[in-house]
Amino acid sequence: MISSLAPGSRIIARDEEWLVRRVDLTPSGAHLLTVTGLSPLVRNREAAFIDRVEELDEPIQLVDPKTTVPAHDSSPFYRDTRLFLEALLRQSVPPDARLTLGHRGAMDLLPYQLDPARLALQQPRQRILIADAVGLGKTIECGILLTEMIRRGRGRRIYGHQVVLSRCGIEIRGRSRKLRINYRTTEELKNWATGLLRGLSFDDLDAGTDDDQGVRSLVHGEPPVLKTCANETALAEAISEHVKQLMASDQAKPESICVVAGTHRELDEYQKYLKRVCPAFHQIEPGKPEDSATPGLRLATVHRVKGLEFDHVILAGKLDEMDAVDETSERFRQKRALLYVAATRARCSLFVCRAASAR
C-alpha cells in the first residue's frame, strides 16, 4: 500500500485515472479505496478497490504531482484555472468531523441543532436516532447531517420512497397493537377531524395502510363551530368575537386558547384585531419549546402546533383544503393532514373560521 495515499489523491488503477474519496481499513488489514473516475472512459463513475487485491495483478500507482506538466491558461483573468481549483476544493473530502457545509443553509440556526451532526460524524458508521421534542427542528437537524454525509460521499442511501420498517430490521407485526382510545379530544371533535381524511390513505410504515377504524373518545362535547365570513376582515373580527365569548361566558384563560393559521402573516393580521379583547399574546415560535408559564393568548401556525394541546382551538385562514378531495396530489394530502393535526389539538372546543374568498 502506498503510505502517502489519502483522500484527494489521484491514482492509476486498471489503466484508468481515479480520484480517491475515502480510505478505509478492512478487517483483514487491507485498505479499501472509494474513488471517482477522472479519465474519459470512467469519468464521474464511482468504484471501490482493495489494495491487496489489485496488487495480485497490477499495483495501484499514485499520480505524483511533481510529474505534472504545466499548461498555459489563456482565459481572461485566469478564469479556467480558478474554476478548476474551485471544483477541486469542492470535490475534496473533509478529513475530520468538523461541519463544512450543513450549517450554512438558509435557515435561522440554533446552536443545539448542530449537535446531532457533530455526534454522528464522530462515529465510524453513522447510526443515530433524533428524537427531540416537537418543534425543536428535527427536520433541520436531519438536513444538516445529510448535507455533511453527501459532502463526504456517504449519501448514497437516502431514500425518497416509502420506508417499510420490517425491511429495515424493525419487526412490529405480532408485537404491537394500535391504541384505539382517544384521550385528548371529544368524540364530536374527533369525528369531524377524521372526516378531513376521508378518501385518503396513509402509510403505516409496514407495507400497509393506516386507518382510524374503531377509535373512540372517552368524553363527549359540543361539535365544532364552522363559520364562513365574507372577507378576511370579517374573519378577523369573528375570531376576536369568539375569543371574547370564550373568556366571558366560558371563563377560559387566554393561555388555554390557541389561534392557528397557515402562515405567520395571517397571525399578524389577526393579532391587530385580537388586541381589542386580549392585550397579552404569546406566539409559539418554530425551534423553541412551548412555555406554559408565559401568559397570553397563544398564536401558532399549523406546522408549529403539532404535539401541543389546548382547551380551545381556533382554526382560521385560507382553508381551501377543506373542499374537494384530490387523492392524486401529495401536496393536497399533506395539507389535509396538517388540518387534521391542528383540529385534534383541541380538547374541549374547536372554532373553524374561513373567508368566502378562500374557496
Image (cartoon, helix red, strand yellow):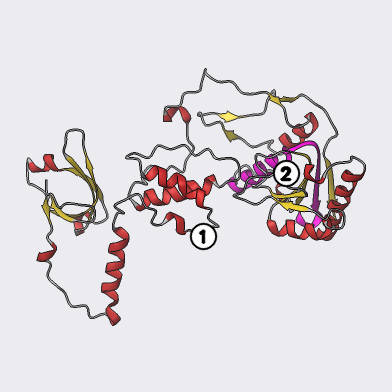
Whether residue 313 can be seen here? no
Q: Nearer the viewer, residue 26 or 341?
A: 26
Q: Position of residue 93 (x, y in %)?
A: 29, 54
Check if residue 352 falls in the magenta segment. Answer: yes
Question: Mark 1 — residue?
Answer: 106
Q: Quadrant of the N terminus?
A: top left
Q: From the viewer's perspective, tell me whether residue 158 is left or right of residue 271.
A: left
239 over 132 or under it: above or below: below
**Label 2 crowd bin: few (<14), some (14–19), many (20+), radius 10 Å:** few
**Label 2 amino acid?**
Ala
The disc at residue 245 is none
Q: From the viewer's perspective, tell me whether residue 257 is left or right of residue 79.
A: right
Q: Position of residue 170 (x, y in %)?
A: 45, 27
Q: How far apart in space, not on screen, are marks 1 and 2 (Cα)? A: 32 Å
Q: Nearer the viewer, mark 1 or mark 2?
A: 2
Q: Assign a secondary structure to mark 2.
A: loop
| Of pointers 1 and 2, the one earlier in the residue sequence | 1
The extreme right residue here reads 249
Question: Mark 2 — residue?
Answer: 293
Magenta stretch: give its range.
330-359
Q: Position of residue 358 (x, y in %)?
A: 76, 55
The extreme front residue here reads 293
Mark 1 touches mark 2? (CB < 8 Å): no
Q: From the viewer's perspective, tell me whether residue 164 is left or right of residue 287.
A: left
